[in-house]
Structure formats: structure tokens, C-alpha cells
Image: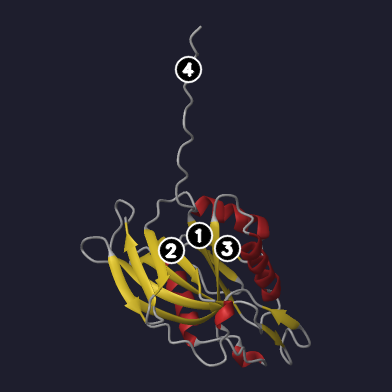
Amino acid sequence: MGATLIARRSAPAAGPVPVVVVELFTSEGCSSCPAADAALRELAAAQSVSGVEVVALGHHVDYWNRLGWKDLYSAPAYTERQRWYAAGFGTGSYTPQAVVNGRYELVGSQRNALATTIAKAAKAPQATVALARAPNGGLSVQVSHLPPGTKAADVTLALAENGLASQVGRGENAGRLLRHAAVVRTLRPLGHIGADGTFAATVPLDLQAGWKPENLRAVVLVQETGSHYVVGAGSLALE
């Protein structure tokens, strides 16, 4: 009796996991911000949104500094980035404000809404962003396969440090130990997507004294210049 052959359908190959970047505009001087910092810190650590890689960026704005406590991690560049987003959303700047892949904004402490928004943002097509450490110690960046219809886009590098905390002495959070989510240490433009829809460069990391390399992550954003949408992102731990 001949053997019976049973055809089995192969499981489809798993595609790349979509990356969603959550930028939190926060301040140590804002009493509403610690809850948002905690939400983002836990979300990034647990990676609890199914099928999505969540990348956290904590931008500490400087406009709270005049109200009794100077946030040591704040800088005008992060305030300007928030204003850049606000102009596109047609909203004012506030803390704690979360911006998800440049497409959506909401109060950063709204955990359920944040998870829902991340899942929604993950459905948009994304470019391929490949990061690697270069032999010279820098960062190799390669961007390709932009989503169809992508318009002019810029490439930006953020270096974010985990594990940072502050004992606040004055202001709305006086007496509190604040633990932060992925504090952005530097944010700098790398260039523009070429006419062929790609970008490639090896860039120095310029790590500063006092930063802990084992806690640092490089995050590269590909953003449409006009819409501010993040159409691709990649991250790499520098440990």
C-alpha cells in the first residue's frame, strides 16, 4: 500500500516588527509629569503592546525652569521641538505631552489611550532603518524602502539615557525622587533622504563625560519634513 502524502502549508515568514517612537515632553518642575514618566518607562521596559517595538524618548523642556526648579536635563532644543510639533497639530505646548510617531498627540499619563495610539500608529507602512556600530566607534545608519508616497524627509539622531533620576529640592515636585524615561541627551540632524529614497552615513556619537554608555541608546528618526510624520525609525543599545 503506497504512502499517503499530506501537503502542509508553510507558515508565512514573519515580517519586521514595526517601530513606534513615543516622545514625551516633560519637566521635573511639573507635578503632572512623574506619572507620565512612569507610564512611558514601564511601557518601554515591558514592551506590552503586542507586535510593536516601542522606543521611548524623554524630552525635558526648559519653560518650567523659571518656576522654582531648574531641570538639569532640560534644553531649549527640546522646547523648540515641542513647538514644531504644536504648530503641526494646531495645539499649544503643554506637559506632559506625548507625541506618537509624529502623527498623534495626547496627555502622556493616559496609559490606556497611549497603548491604543501606539497600536494605531504601528499600522502605517514604515521605512527600513538599519543601525550598527562602526569600526571607528561611530554609528552606521542606512535607510531604505520608504513607504510609497513619502515626501521630502529628514534623518535625525537622538541619544537617550535610561536609569536617570533626580532628587527635586524646590518647585511643584519638591522633596520627590523622580525617575525618568529615556532622557534625551542630544538631538541632531544627520541629513536628508536622497532622491533615490535612501540615506547612508557613518556619524560620530560624541558621547559626553558623565553619560553611562551601558544605559545609552541611539535612536534614528526618518520624518517627513512637512507632516512631521515618523515614517521609519531604528534604535540600537550602545552598551
The mark lying in front, picked from 3 and 1, is 1
Q: Nearer the viewer, residue 226 or 235?
A: 235
Residue to which mark 3 is pinned = 106
Disc nearer the start of the sequence (3/1): 1
Q: Nearer the viewer, residue 142 or 233?
A: 142
Q: Which mark is residue 233?
A: 2
Q: Is mark 3 on a helix, strand or loop?
A: strand
Mark 2: give few (<14), some (14-19) or many (20+) Cα within 10 Å.
many
Q: Do the residues under discs 3 and 4 have CB atoms within 8 angstroms?
A: no
Could you tell me residue 123's position as x and y percent? Answer: 47, 49
Could you tell me residue 43's position as x and y percent? Answer: 64, 62
The mark lying in front, picked from 3 and 4, is 4
Real-space CA distance between mark 3 and mark 4, rounded to the nearest whole angstrom:
56 Å
Disc nearer the start of the sequence (2/3): 3
Residue to which mark 1 is pinned = 20
Real-space CA distance between mark 2 and mark 1, rounded to the nearest whole angstrom:
8 Å
Real-space CA distance between mark 3 and mark 1, rounded to the nearest whole angstrom:
15 Å
Disc nearer the start of the sequence (4/1): 4
